[in-house]
């Protein structure tokens, strides 16, 4: 169990401010009258002490209180250009930011949970004892903002007033970080006190880029102090390491779901999107996929796109599963984003009208951002994440594999701004899980019950992606949330079973697996390419929408329910005007029994190592494996869907 407010509060200890009178005296010394007047509108004393201790620790030359006004946003954008954290591009409102070559993904080996003695963390995470982290902070964060301006913003991770929305303070010396924060989150300066009172908690984030030199990257740290719900980030600029309202605070929200609201809330690494069905029916999906596995593309297929990355979920009084998007923007991987697969997003990236920050792409001679997979002719030269670039540099890609675009979601044509702003949340009727699986699971299957649905989420595997520095090979990625679950994975598994099994959830969602990454080679075809293409996701989600409402039937298999060929053929024609031969259906939906059993064995072996892992998971594995072995005895190792 995680104990909150246990051990030394490192921010307070290093800052040394212990009373509200000391805090106010410091504010009078450090803030000019304008910003002193702004801060006076924040009255929550715990929040004021956090800000005061950040000032005392970092010692900035000035403090800027960001109210979320257009004047404040314009000031940050202008200063970011002056500081050269960003550079203008050919299209008005578009800028580019370059991180250091060593700082272009999450630093998994330098991201640490601050732990108290005897406190468990996820077996897939790294921790450091509180005393060691305290010593690092005293050495490296004292005075780290000398000569700089500290920016302080007050935000809400979700629509103001939403049951699962959590307020947060973002403190940084980086204008790029603050510019990104304003694109991605709701500035709730005017509502902050009321939101803290409603929720009973808030998160605090303190970042400084420090010297911003490659030689200092080895001493960079990204710390999560779970007990005090405070993050620290130093000597780095990549937004995944610095804009800690995102994945840093997502970790804290996961802790809350596990240890404060177990069985009634979840904090998930999921998109939220709506599909329009027959007669204008709206069905909302929440779906998990590890970074780089098509989550943004899947989200944007929806007729009512809400969010591409995170979901705060809860059980409402009426028995429904509700969700809100903590964000209002997108910080998405841009590689392979092109007109064919992502027309709505490409309009924002190639036409005037949207404010966009590109990061770690190539900038050609016309100041146009370019990236691998953009579907356009390769430029003759340009500047990218490592300097001057030409196509002859075969070992250096045109853009970094983790290059990104940051923009407000409401710039995207199919974004539902009203749905994303609704504090009542959206009723989620379909939950999906996907990873990168070249040879085992079909493109789509539906769990037979809630426990089997939890097992789908607990069994995600994925190849390591460029979003994680230092990660290689095939990784287990339970719920695609594993990199952001700080607590014991067995505790998180229990939270999943308790949530989806809660009798108060009287309107259960269907739970399904998605897999876009089956290859020809693995299914007896020619070549190593994928068995399908990006736009097929319209059909997979379209079938789930119909199945949810009983408009189509399915074929029962040991792993769950799969679509019938006739329904998919019709959907391929109607949704994407594409032929769908039965031979392709057979390749995609045949059960390769030995592969599935091997995957179950891999997951069971891994979960057996997690002390206290629920027997409910192993019961699902045992039932599925027995049914698969029986099926194999009857029909062989490869079972066609037509035979079922």
Image (cartoon, rainbow, N blue to C red):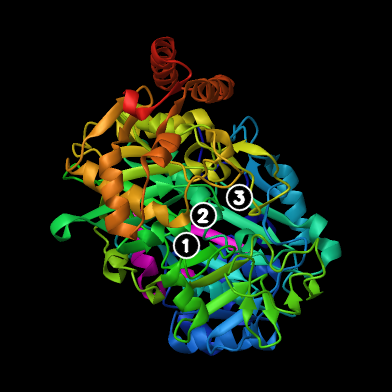
Name the residue beneath numbered marker 3: 224
The span picked out in magenta is: 184-206
Comes first in the chain, label 2 or label 3: 3
Comes first in the chain, label 3 or label 1: 1
| Near-viewer residue (255 or 200) | 255
Which image quadrant for residue 195? bottom left
User: In the visual, does 571 lie left or right of 364?
Assistant: left
Residue 99 location (% of width, % of height): 71, 69
| Near-viewer residue (149 or 405) | 405
| Near-viewer residue (197 or 302) | 302
Residue 532 location (% of width, % of height): 47, 49
Q: In the rendered view, tell whether residue 640 sits above or below residue 78.
A: above
Mark 2 to mark 1 CA distance (whole Å): 8 Å
Name the residue beneath numbered marker 1: 168
User: In the visual, does 305 lie left or right of 6?
Assistant: left
Name the residue beneath numbered marker 2: 249
Q: Quadrant of the C terminus?
A: top left
Residue placed furthest toward the right:
215
User: How many residues crowd mark 3 within 10 Å: few (<14), some (14–19), many (20+)?
Assistant: many
């Amino acid at each position: 169990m995680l104990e909150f407010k246990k051990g030394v509060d490192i921010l307070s200890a290093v800052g040394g401010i212990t009373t509200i009178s000391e805090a106010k005296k410091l504010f009078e010394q450090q803030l000019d009258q304008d910003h002193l007047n702004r801060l006076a509108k924040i009255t929550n004393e715990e929040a004021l002490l956090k800000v005061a201790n950040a000032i005392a620790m970092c010692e900035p030359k000035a403090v800027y209180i960001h109210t979320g006004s257009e004047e404040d946003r314009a000031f940050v954008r202008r200063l970011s250009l002056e500081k050269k954290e960003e550079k203008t591009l050919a299209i008005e409102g578009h800028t580019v930011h370059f991180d250091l070559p060593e700082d272009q993904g999450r630093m998994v080996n330098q991201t640490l949970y601050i732990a108290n003695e005897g406190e468990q963390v996820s077996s897939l995470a790294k921790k450091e004892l509180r005393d060691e982290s305290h010593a690092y902070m005293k050495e490296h964060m004292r005075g780290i903002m000398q000569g700089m301006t500290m920016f302080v913003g007050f935000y809400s991770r979700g629509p103001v007033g939403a049951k699962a929305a959590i307020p947060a303070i973002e403190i940084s010396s980086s204008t790029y970080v603050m510019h990104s924060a304003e694109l991605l989150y709701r500035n709730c300066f005017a509502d902050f006190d009321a939101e803290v009172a409603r929720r009973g908690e808030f998160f605090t984030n303190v970042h400084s880029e420090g010297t911003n030199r490659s030689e200092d990257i080895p001493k960079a740290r990204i710390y999560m102090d779970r007990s005090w719900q405070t993050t620290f980030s130093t000597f780095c600029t990549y937004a995944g390491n610095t804009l800690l309202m995102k994945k840093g605070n997502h970790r804290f929200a996961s802790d809350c779901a596990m240890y404060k609201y177990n069985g009634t809330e979840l904090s998930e690494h999921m998109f939220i999107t709506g599909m329009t069905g027959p007669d204008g029916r709206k069905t909302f999906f929440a779906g998990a996929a590890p970074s780089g596995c098509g989550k943004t593309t899947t989200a944007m297929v929806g007729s009512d796109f809400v969010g591409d990355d995170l979901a705060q979920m809860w059980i409402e009084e009426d028995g429904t599963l509700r969700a809100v998007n903590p964000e209002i923007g997108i910080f998405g991987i841009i590689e392979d984003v092109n007109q064919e697969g992502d027309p709505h997003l490409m309009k924002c990236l190639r036409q005037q009208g949207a404010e966009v920050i590109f990061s770690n792409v190539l900038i050609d001679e016309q100041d146009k951002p370019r990236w691998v997979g953009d579907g356009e002719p390769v430029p003759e030269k340009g500047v990218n994440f490592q300097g001057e670039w030409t196509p002859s540099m075969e070992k250096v890609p045109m853009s970094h594999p983790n290059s990104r675009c940051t923009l407000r979601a409401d710039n995207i044509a199919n974004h539902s701004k009203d749905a994303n702003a609704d504090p009542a949340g959206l009723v989620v009727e379909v939950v999906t899980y996907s990873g990168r699986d070249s040879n085992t699971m079909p493109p789509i299957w539906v769990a037979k019950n809630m426990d089997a649905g939890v097992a789908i989420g607990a069994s995600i595997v994925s190849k390591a992606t460029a979003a994680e520095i230092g990660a290689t090979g095939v990784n287990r990625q339970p719920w695609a949330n594993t990199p952001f679950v700080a607590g014991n994975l067995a505790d998180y598994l229990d939270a999943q079973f308790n949530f989806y099994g809660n009798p108060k959830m009287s309107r259960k969602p269907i739970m399904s697996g998605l897999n876009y990454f089956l290859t020809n080679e693995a299914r007896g075809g020619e070549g190593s390419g994928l068995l399908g293409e990006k736009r097929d996701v319209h059909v997979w989600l379209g079938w789930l929408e119909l199945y949810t409402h009983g408009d189509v039937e399915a074929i029962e298999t040991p792993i769950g329910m799969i679509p019938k060929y006739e329904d998919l053929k019709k959907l391929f024609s109607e949704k994407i005007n594409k032929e769908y031969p039965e031979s392709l259906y057979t390749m995609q939906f045949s059960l390769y029994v030995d592969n599935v059993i091997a995957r179950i064995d891999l997951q069971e072996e891994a979960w057996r190592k997690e002390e206290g892992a629920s027997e409910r998971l192993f019961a699902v594995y045992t039932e599925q494996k027995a049914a698969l072995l029986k099926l194999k005895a009857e029909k062989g190792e490869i079972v066609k869907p037509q035979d079922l």
